[in-house]
Image: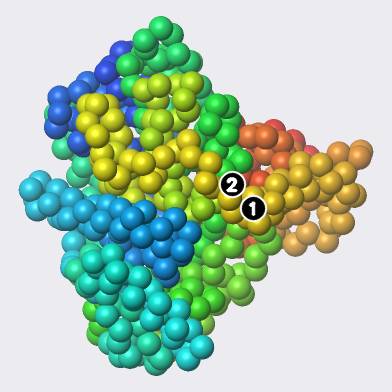
Amino acid sequence: MNSVWLDSVNRFDNLGSLNEDVEADICIIGAGIFGATCAYYLSKLGYKTIVLEKDDIATKTTAFTTGKITSQHGLFYSYLIKTFGLSFAKDYFDSNEEAINNIVNIIEDEKINCDLELQNNYVYTASASSIPAIEEEISAVQSLGGSCEFTTTTSFPFKIKGAACFKNQAQFNPLKYVHALCQKSIDRGTTFYINTVATNIEKHGELYQTFANNHIITSKYVIVASHYPFMKLPGFYFSKMYQSTSYIIAIDAKKTLPNGMYICSDVPHFSFRTAKFNGKRILLIGGFEHKTGLPVSYKDSYGALENEAKSLYPECEVLYKWSTEDCISLDKVPYIGSYSPTLPNVFVGTGFKKWGMTLSNVAANIIVDKIQNVDNKYAEIYCSSRFDAFKNFKEFKNMMVQSANSLIFNKLKPSEEDFEEIPNDSGGIIQINKEKVGIYKDVNGKVFAVKPICTHLGCLLSWNDVDKTWDCPCHGSRYDFSGKNIYNPAFDDLETYDIN
């Protein structure tokens, strides 16, 4: 799986993996946009900082985002006002508006070439029955002091009944931006280690020891900026979040493309934006979100996006297709702050939903302020130790039922798959000597066999025939067809069998 962003940058060729014990003021775990932003701010303040990355710089969620820099997070502000009140919603809105300005200022101050473009952002509907929800959202944003207007026209070739237009939003190439942040940090003395897997953090007096690659990083502060908090305890983030998968294609429309960023308020939630690539402007179309681990077909993911593209631009060419995975808290508000009351000076930022471009900057500013003992006016609404998330009992119950099924009941059920019935380039779970075995046959019939039990908490995995991965329906860990871990909270690979 590849994305247009990954093909737009050269990889860092001078970074190695951790091969000795080291010391620093701050250890950051994860080099996506959140970790890179923390490193950038801390390098400007003169802290000796080490960044650990399991894979390569920003090659996971950041590399597979749409790259929209916006405070418009769906029809969200009416929800926030109803759920948490006007003051809470205004802080959320203001923090994300400030993040847009922060990102634009960084790009301008550092002269970063990342294809930044100011754009209007539209939440639209093609259904007359959805107009009241659009109008309610506009009223909510206006009550917060935001600029949001109703319109019935867009420059895209589809008809709408109405849309909420957010002005002064932006889009960019997220990997060009993150690479520049990392290079600026390196120039100021920050050390990045790639292919370095952090497995635990322990408190020793006033310091912390982070264990990675059989070595120890000793620091006063630790920032957990991994895609998903990898330590099961304390924090219990696996009980407060779920992961969601969605799909994106990039097309050459073979026509001049309009400006603006768009997202549909109706199901399916189509998302659109343009991007610069190889001297031309291409279109990114995303959507078809589902909880990670649930069955999905090509027809209902990439296929549906391709059909939408063809309906708009019949002569278009699909250039890229990829999926992305996002952490979502039970109350839809990120967790930012202390990892746990029992681990002072260990910080976390997670649950950015599908809006990590702005929320990663919000999180970085909150945590950098905490390290400097500076009050941040937005810290309280994102408090990582809050219990409000559990007020969404329906979501919590659904997550617990799914986890229980995958942990216990589904593992006890006999497998319905038969080895001979699994076609080439597909997979499934079969039964061998009363043990479940995950089977994938490549296009030539070569068999890859794994133990289909997640290495995080032992849930039964499901086969994703769209991306050819083993996905965990409990907490969203993912593995490629050969068993290699590609998304946390798990960090160990699957046990494999040789049955060829």
Location of residue 255 in the rendering, given as x and y in whole percent from the top left corner: 29, 86
The quarter holding residue 454 reads top right
Instruction: Say whether marks 2 and 1 touch (CB < 8 Å).
Output: yes
Q: Around disc 1, counting alpha carbons within 10 Å, would you say few (fewer than 14), some (14 to 19), or many (20 or more)? A: few
Name the residue tied to disc 2.
390
Q: Secondary structure at mark 2?
A: helix
- The three-letter code of the residue at mark 2 reads Phe
- Looking at the image, residue 477 sits to the left or right of residue 52; the answer is right
Location of residue 469 in the rendering, given as x and y in whole percent from the top left corner: 61, 51
The quarter holding residue 312 reads bottom left
Where 213 falls versus 496 (above or below)?
above
Q: Secondary structure at mark 1?
A: helix
The quarter holding residue 93 reads bottom left
Q: Residue at x 15, y 24 (%)?
A: 46
**In this view of the protein, can residue 475 be seen by the observer?**
yes
- Residue 393's label in the rendered image is 1
How far is the residue under mark 2 from the one under mark 1? Answer: 6 Å
Q: Residue at x 66, y 46 (%)?
A: 474
- The three-letter code of the residue at mark 1 reads Phe
Q: Nearer the viewer, residue 364 or 479?
A: 364
Q: Residue furthest top?
A: 205
Location of residue 50 in the rendering, given as x and y in whole percent from the top left corner: 30, 24
Q: Around disc 2, counting alpha carbons within 10 Å, would you say few (fewer than 14), some (14 to 19), or many (20 or more)? A: some
Where 311 falls versus 237 (above or below)?
below
Q: Nearer the viewer, residue 418 or 71?
A: 71
**In this view of the protein, can residue 306 be seen by the observer?**
no
Location of residue 122 in the rendering, given as x and y in whole percent from the top left corner: 33, 76
Q: Residue at x 27, y 75 (%)?
A: 148
- Looking at the image, residue 235 sits to the left or right of residue 141; the answer is right
In which quadrant is the C terminus drawn?
A: top right
Q: Nearer the viewer, residue 121 or 64?
A: 121
